[in-house]
Image (spheres, rainbow, N blue to C red):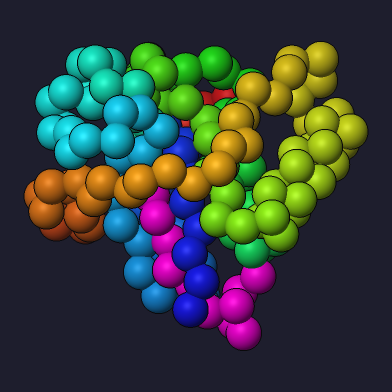
Amino acid sequence: MTLATFGAGCFWGVEYFFKQVEGVLDAKCGYMGGKDQFQTYQEVKEGQTGHAEVVQIEFDEKVVSYETLLAVFWQNHNPTTLNKQGDDVGHQYRSAIFFHDENQQQLAQFSKQQLTESGKWGVRQIVTEIVPLQQFHQAEEYHQNYLEKNDLPSCHISY
């Protein structure tokens, strides 16, 4: 099994759309990219920690490729809004790919370049960070499967 980690705004929706992908075995909401000590949701939400809300995905490479996960990532958020997704504003909602190895780094950079060249976003710059994996802090249990537990529809970002 392989891991991938993405930040694309509020982690509830990110977790939801990745769990719909065949070959994704698990997706956990958490925090990454800030201070390496444990953080609470409230501290992260208030923007005090430097962490992004992320989802760490465990997937079976025999069923789904990292490239497919990258495509799902790009399709389900707006990578041109700096520190903002929908109504969520702040560094904790930034668009980020935390690569686990050199191969993931190269694939992420290539996919970002392809998206830029596609013209999908016009002249708007893709601001997604592609950065090395840092310590993953799993979010509190009530955040895991939050939309499902609370019978809420999936999050959708309007462009």
* Total labels drawn: 0
Asked where in the image residue 13 lies, by quadrant, the reply is: top left
Q: Residue at x 75, y 25 (%)?
A: 121
Report if residue 33 is visible in the image. Answer: yes
Q: Residue at x 62, y 57 (%)?
A: 101
Q: Residue at x 37, y 15 (%)?
A: 90
Image coords of residue 113 (percent x, y): 82, 37
The magenta stretch spans which residues?
55-65
Report if residue 152 is visible in the image. Answer: no
Image coords of residue 65 (percent x, y): 65, 70
Image coords of residue 7 (percent x, y): 46, 39
Is 15 included in the stretch rendered in magenta? no
Extreme-right residue of the structure: 117
- Of 42 and 152, which appears nearest the observer? 42
Q: Residue at x 62, y 37 (%)?
A: 130
Q: Quadrant of the C terminus?
A: top right
Image coords of residue 74 (percent x, y): 63, 43
Q: In the image, is residue 35 above or below residue 137? A: above
- Of 100 and 115, which appears nearest the observer? 100
Horizontal placement of 60 versus 9: left or right? right
Horizontal placement of 50 versus 143: left or right? right
Asked where in the image residue 81 lies, by quadrant, the reply is: top right
- Of 40 and 17, which appears nearest the observer? 40
Q: In the image, is residue 141 above or below residue 82? A: below
